[in-house]
Amino acid sequence: MSEIAEAVNLEFRYDEEAELIFENLNLSFKQGEMTAILGHNGCGKSTFAKHLNAILLPSGGKVYVDGIDTADETRLFDIRQRVGMVFQNPDNQIVATIVEEDVAFALENLGGPPQEIRRRVDEALQAVGMYKYRLHAPHQLSGGQKQRVAIAGIIAMRPKCIVLDEPTAMLDPVGRNKVMKTVKKLNEEFGITIILITHYMEEASQCKRVIVMDKGKVLMDDCPKEVFSNVDKLKEVGLDVPQATELVYELNKLGLSLDTHITDENECCEALLKLLS
């Protein structure tokens, strides 16, 4: 698989007098991967995400998107056509006065055929459970509903990569589940690379790869089962683990001998039943 995004010796500071947030950071993402990025507030994960579609530019080193240098101002349109971004606050990216017009906004600017725009807008709104609100005004929606509209706008574009920065932070558990199902569908059926920044460990455990950042550096980079088996190390940097992993961790402290790589409820139930039998 080719690399859709790559940071090479990335350095960044917000101004000349500020401390470096990244120093010689190297990370790459292959086309079709679904990756979660974890870290406590201020560790640099959102700052890194903004480098992936040239909202921020490196102070040193390079960031490439599909082989394009993000510092090349003449290729900005190409970069953002390849990498879509969903922010934590949907008000930052809702621009139209009607829901379906907002979802269609980027596609119309890309010059898509009207029938294809109509089809993609309808599919995207249905995917996030917002189709019945298609003629509503976004400002009349709840925060969670606005977020789903913002996600639908990116889904409709179907870029090669979608970066989601805390996309479910304003949603209830049902809404979060719908969004994650949609994101996984985009990854599995369309091969879209997903880079998910989240504080919800159950969401991270659904990804194929988990990156843990701390103080602008990569602390861990592995599959979810390997990363979450390091409970003590994660707690040291202020992070939680999935609830099933936490339960196994506490039971093992009491003397049981359960697999520390368990990350979901079904695995945990099976392990406990096996132990009890």
Image (cartoon, grey):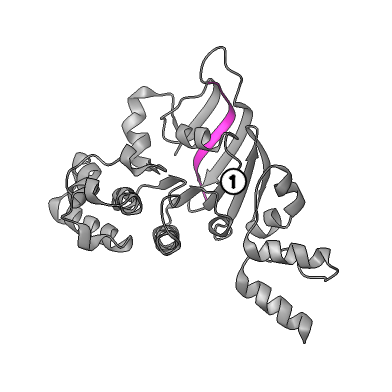
What is the residue that sits farthest to the bottom in this orientation?
277
Overall secondary structure of the magenta section: strand
Residue, x 54% and y 44% (percent of image)? 29
Instruction: Locate residue 20: give its quadrant.
Output: top right
Residue 64 at x, y = what percent?
Answer: 48, 33
State whether residue 268 is above or below residue 2: below
Residue 96 at x, y = what percent?
Answer: 19, 42
- Number of numbered discs present? 1
Q: Amino acid at mark 1?
A: Leu
Neighbour tally class for label 1: few under 14, some 14-19, many 20 plus, Cα within 10 Å: many
State whether residue 1 is above or below residue 265: above
State whether residue 269 is above or below residue 27: below
Residue, x 58% and y 33% (percent of image)? 42
Left or right of 215? Residue 116 is left
Q: Is residue 88 magenta?
A: no
Left or right of 42? Residue 114 is left
Residue at numbered disc 1 = 38
What residue span does the magenta drawing correspond to?
1-13
